[in-house]
Image: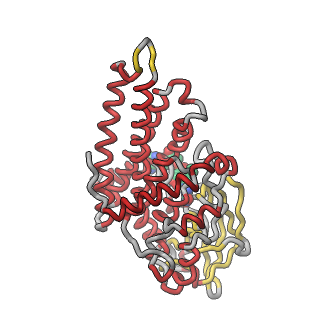
């Protein structure tokens, strides 16, 4: 079915992004996967091509484009080209909105130029060793001190944690200091802020994921995002776009898997016939094709709703769980269609299958997504 949400400018942007990724990212896949990091020089080059934080205002180096279709184009092209690293979706779709929506003009003036130039890598730290799904149970605490706050606690599974220059840290505020949760921006190198292990993951190996430790780290008032005490409200507000971003990636990934599976099923023969001609495989791929088309229509509608400020938390949660499960089904089918070759690292489907697994876990697990949808039904 023809897609209708994009205009000429988005398609032109897509061409630029695709050409850039094919030239500057795809050839480095193996190196970045074994290093466990994406080269920072690549990040600066991507920024120079207008792919980093383009929704920031022009006076701070962005393009002032708050149009999620541009975000979607980058997310889709990462999938299409097979480029690795989650830096774009993390920066553009997930973390940057905090700096655009809650930061004061003075904070924006200090932080955004570095972010848009690709010099400042950003991350967000909500999850902790003891809790991920239940954000209200976080133990990292911020207590009042002269002119600021003292932050103590630890975080884990933080994407870009090793490379991050600025980390938004979610922390509990004791009742005596106002209660609620706050968002505190901590710079790499701050006294008492330590980066722990780069975690060893089964997939998404080019993306660094880290533990972070905070021991009595002083955060001046000037580095608090928004109202202290309203952090949970800000996080809930931004999580819909985070989940849409994951759904966009998942849908593009399911499309890739379907195309790859169909191509292989047409070429590979067994018992003297293409394997796709066996009814078992033909039916499997027919069902998958139908589900992928339905997902595409729904996700495009979600992108349009997000742009109109109408995407609800429940719609985003439903999009996230349904498409990430479809993504895994599609990649698993694609792998199965490849037989033994599908299990070999030299076939790209193997890496994509490993990489996709976490989509059902992060950004809120798919069980939590079902809870959100269920609650929206009044249950
Ligand atoms: C690669 C990777 C990158 C990540 N990046 C970040 C990041 O940048 N920043 C960040 O803050 N976090 C990040 N996370 C953390 C991620 O968001 C959490 O792992 C996730 O929210 C789940 O939390 P948990 O791991 O503590 O699992 P738990 O909350 O302990 O859940 C364990 C299991 O219990 C289930 N469960 C929990 N509560 C319920 C319930 N009410 N009903 C039914 N089932 C339930 C869950 O669905 C899950 O299956 C990342 C994680 C990974 C793996």
What percent of the width, then of the height, locates residue 52? Answer: 51, 67
Q: From the viewer's perspective, is residue 233 above or below residue 369?
A: below
Note whether residue 129 is visible.
no
Q: What residue occupies the far top of the structure in this picture?
A: 271
Image quadrant where residue 255 sits: top left
What percent of the width, then of the height, locates residue 290? Answer: 29, 37
Q: From the viewer's perspective, is residue 77 above or below residue 180?
A: above
Q: Residue at x 52, y 86 (%)?
A: 106
Q: Residue at x 33, y 19 (%)?
A: 279
What percent of the width, then of the height, locates residue 71? Answer: 42, 62
Note whether residue 280 is visible.
yes
Which residue occupies the foreground of this view, 256 or 242?
A: 256
Which residue occupies the foreground of this view, 363 or 349?
A: 349
Color style of the picture: secondary structure
In the shown orientation, is residue 71 left or right of residue 294?
right
Say which quadrant the N terminus sits in: top left
Q: From the viewer's perspective, is residue 22 above or below residue 280?
A: below
In the shown orientation, is residue 162 left or right of residue 311?
right
Q: How many marks?
A: 0
Q: Residue at x 35, y 51 (%)?
A: 319
Q: From the viewer's perspective, is residue 82 above or below residue 121?
A: above
Q: Residue at x 60, y 55 (%)?
A: 157
């Amino acid at each position: 079915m023809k897609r209708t949400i994009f205009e000429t400018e988005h398609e032109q942007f897509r061409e630029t992004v695709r050409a850039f990724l094919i030239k500057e990212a795809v050839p480095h896949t193996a190196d970045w996967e074994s290093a466990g990091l994406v080269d920072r020089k690549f990040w600066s080059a991507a920024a120079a091509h207008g792919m980093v934080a383009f929704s920031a205002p022009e006076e701070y180096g962005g393009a002032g484009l708050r149009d999620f279709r541009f975000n979607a184009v980058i997310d889709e092209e990462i999938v299409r080209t097979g480029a690795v690293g989650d830096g774009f979706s993390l920066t553009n779709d997930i973390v940057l909105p905090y700096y655009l929506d809650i930061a004061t003009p003075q904070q924006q003036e200090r932080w955004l130029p570095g972010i848009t130039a690709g010099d400042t890598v950003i991350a967000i730290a909500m999850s902790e060793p003891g809790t991920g799904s239940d954000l209200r149970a976080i133990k990292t605490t911020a207590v009042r001190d002269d002119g600021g706050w003292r932050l103590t606690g630890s975080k884990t599974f933080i994407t870009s944690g090793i490379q991050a220059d600025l980390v938004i840290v979610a922390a509990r505020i004791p009742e005596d200091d106002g209660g609620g949760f706050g968002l505190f921006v901590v710079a790499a190198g701050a006294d008492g802020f330590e980066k722990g292990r780069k975690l060893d993951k089964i997939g998404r190996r080019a993306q660094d994921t880290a533990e972070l430790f905070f021991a009595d780290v002083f955060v001046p008032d000037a580095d608090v995002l928004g109202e202290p005490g309203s952090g949970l409200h800000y996080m809930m507000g931004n999580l819909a776009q985070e989940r849409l971003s994951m759904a966009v990636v998942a849908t593009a990934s399911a499309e890739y898997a379907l195309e790859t599976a169909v191509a292989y099923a047409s070429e590979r023969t067994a018992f003297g016939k293409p394997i796709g001609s066996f009814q078992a495989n033909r039916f499997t791929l027919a069902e998958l094709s139908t589900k992928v088309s339905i997902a595409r229509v729904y996700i495009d509608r979600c992108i349009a709703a997000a742009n109109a400020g109408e995407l609800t938390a429940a719609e985003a949660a439903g999009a996230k769980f349904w498409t990430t499960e479809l993504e895994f089904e599609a990649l698993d089918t694609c792998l199965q269609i490849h037989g033994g070759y599908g299990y070999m690292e030299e076939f790209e489907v193997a890496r994509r299958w490993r990489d996709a697994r976490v989509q059902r876990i992060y950004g809120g697990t798919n069980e939590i997504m079902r809870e959100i949808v269920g609650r929206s039904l009044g249950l």
